Structures are given as C-alpha cells and as structure tokens.
Image (cartoon, helix red, strand yellow):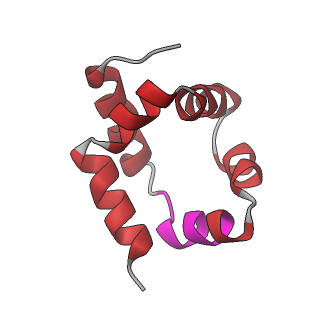
Amino acid sequence: MNFSDEQMKKIMKNASSKGVDVNKVKKAAESGNIEDFIGKNLSPDASKKLKSVLTDKASAERLLSTPEAKELLKNLLKG
C-alpha cells in the first residue's frame, strides 16, 4: 500500500497532535520493543497503517522526509 505525500503529512500531523511521548518511543526503539509500543499506544487501525507504511520502502522514505518526521527524529536523537 502506497500513501501520497498528503496522506503522509496527515499521518504525521495526527501522530504529533496525539501527544506521543518521544521518550517512550525512544526507549521502545532502543530496547527493540517498538512493535509492542505500537500495539499498546495506537488503535488497531492506526497500528496496521503504520506497519504497512514502514514495510513499504517508498512510503517509509516519503514519510521520513516530511518536516514533521524530521522534527520528531531530531527530538528522538537528542540526548
């Protein structure tokens, strides 16, 4: 499943507006429990969409190139 740039921006905006705790995401990623984190913190539909984006290289690259994703990554990589 491929997402348009507009859909990608919408996904990132929605995630940002949900108040995702960057530290929890970082800890989950560092411990290798990101799937667990996704399952516990996203609705089943959102979890399915995110997993489909992350498994499609072109969609993942477009998602990660958005300004919102870059800001999230910047915050994740701090400290």
Q: Quadrant of residue 64?
A: top left
Residue 2 vertical position relative to residue 62 in the rendered view, above or below: above
Residue 61 in percent (x, y) is at 39, 36
Question: Which residue of the protein is positioned furthest toward the bottom in this rendering?
Answer: 79
Q: Which residues are magenta?
A: 20-28
User: In the shown orientation, is residue 39 left or right of residue 27?
Assistant: right
Question: Which residue of the protein is positioned furthest toward the top in this rendering?
Answer: 1
Residue 1 in percent (x, y) is at 53, 13
Q: Residue at x 43, y 26 (%)?
A: 59
Q: Residue at x 45, y 34 (%)?
A: 60
User: In the shown orientation, is residue 76 left or right of residue 8?
Assistant: right
Q: Quadrant of residue 4?
A: top left
| Quadrant (top left, top right, bottom left, bottom right) of the C terminus | bottom left
Residue 63 in percent (x, y) is at 37, 36
Q: Residue at x 38, y 61 (%)?
A: 73
Q: Quadrant of residue 13?
A: top left
Tell me, yes or no, whether the highlighted magenta stretch contains residue 42: no
Q: Residue at x 45, y 49 (%)?
A: 18
Q: Main secondary structure of the magenta part?
A: helix
How many labels, in total?
A: 0
Question: Which residue of the protein is positioned furthest toward the front in this rendering?
Answer: 57
Residue 4 vertical position relative to residue 51 in the rendered view, above or below: above
User: In the shown orientation, is residue 21 left or right of residue 47?
Assistant: left
